[in-house]
Image (spheres, grey):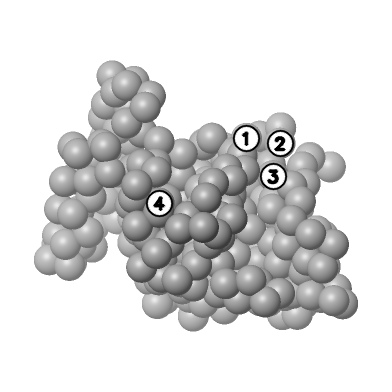
Amino acid sequence: MPSSPPEFLFISDLHLAPEQPATVALFLGFLRRRARRAEALYILGDLFDAWIGDDDDQAPYPAIRQALRDLITSGTRCAIMAGNRDFLLGQRFSQETGCSLLREPSRVELLGTPTLLMHGDLLCTDDLAYQKFRRIIRNPIVRWLFLLKPLAKRRAMAASYRRKSGQAIARKPLAIMDVNQAAVEATLRRHGTWHLIHGHTHRPGEHAFDLDGHAAMRQVLADWHPERGEVLSVSAAGWRREAILPE
């Protein structure tokens, strides 16, 4: 049952895939136990390493859908934001799991603190090649054409993309794959907030800075691995990070 006073949990970048059974098991255990003590769980992108459509019935995706449904049945709300790897998450997934789909960015009130939620890739504005690619693959026509293809073809295309993506990342300077501070500040101003939570960069940490005379904070979520995950908890006790370990 949800804790009282309420607690909100934030995770991102689990990159769940059939090839990562230990990380999948870690996440399923988290949903069965730790997540059920919270008022709500927010998943801020890249829950999956690749999502080729809501009709994908390959293991372990049915088990993950059911575990999310069980979490919501237990009384914990769950909201999920698409990331750069699982941007094809759609209404069927939402209906089957009970998770609400978050638009990016989304502004929420966390115990009276207006907070902006993002996956984070939109803030990496120095990576011009990626931003151009992102605009292409998010085009509704491109998405529609991809989803028309048979599942086997989509799986092969996704595997090819992941290989090419890994090669491209290895060649890029590390600096351009992090967020751009000016983009962070402009985004916060546009939405009238001084707190930001995001993932994507795999560089977990807390970044305090001044924004127009206000104390601002950027919280970066950690990516998950077979031996360890991490959750950001927000409650009356404060903001704290907590390790999620295998059983």
| 164 up-or-down from 195: above or below | above
- The secondary element bearing badge 2 is classed as loop
Lateral position of residue 243 relative to residue 10, left or right? right
Disc marking residue 230: 3
Rounded to the nearest angstrom, the CA distance separating label 3 from label 4 is 23 Å
Disc marking residue 184: 4
Mark 3 or 1, nearer chain start: 1
Q: Amino acid at mark 4?
A: Val
Residue designated by label 2: 228
Mark 4 or 1, nearer chain start: 4
Q: Looking at the picture, how far across and down is residue 231, in whole percent?
A: 69, 50
Mark 4 in CB contact with mark 1 (< 8 angstroms) = no
- Asked whether 112 or 141 is in front, the reply is 112
- Of badges 4 and 1, the one in the foreground is 4
- The secondary element bearing badge 1 is classed as loop
| 100 up-or-down from 190: above or below | below
Rounded to the nearest angstrom, the CA distance separating label 3 from label 1 is 9 Å
- Asked whether 143 or 40 is in front, the reply is 40
- The secondary element bearing badge 3 is classed as strand
Mark 3 in CB contact with mark 2 (< 8 angstroms) = yes
- Asked whether 37 or 104 is in front, the reply is 104
Q: Residue at x 65, y 66 (%)?
A: 41
Q: Looking at the picture, how far across and down is residue 40, in whole percent?
A: 68, 72
Q: Amino acid at mark 3?
A: Glu
Disc marking residue 225: 1
- Asked whether 63 or 243 is in front, the reply is 243
Mark 4 or 2, nearer chain start: 4
Q: Residue at x 55, y 67 (%)?
A: 115
Local packing at callout 4 (Cα closer than 10 Å; few below 14, some 14-19, many 20+) is some
Residue 157 quadrant: top left
Lateral position of residue 122 relative to residue 67, left or right? left
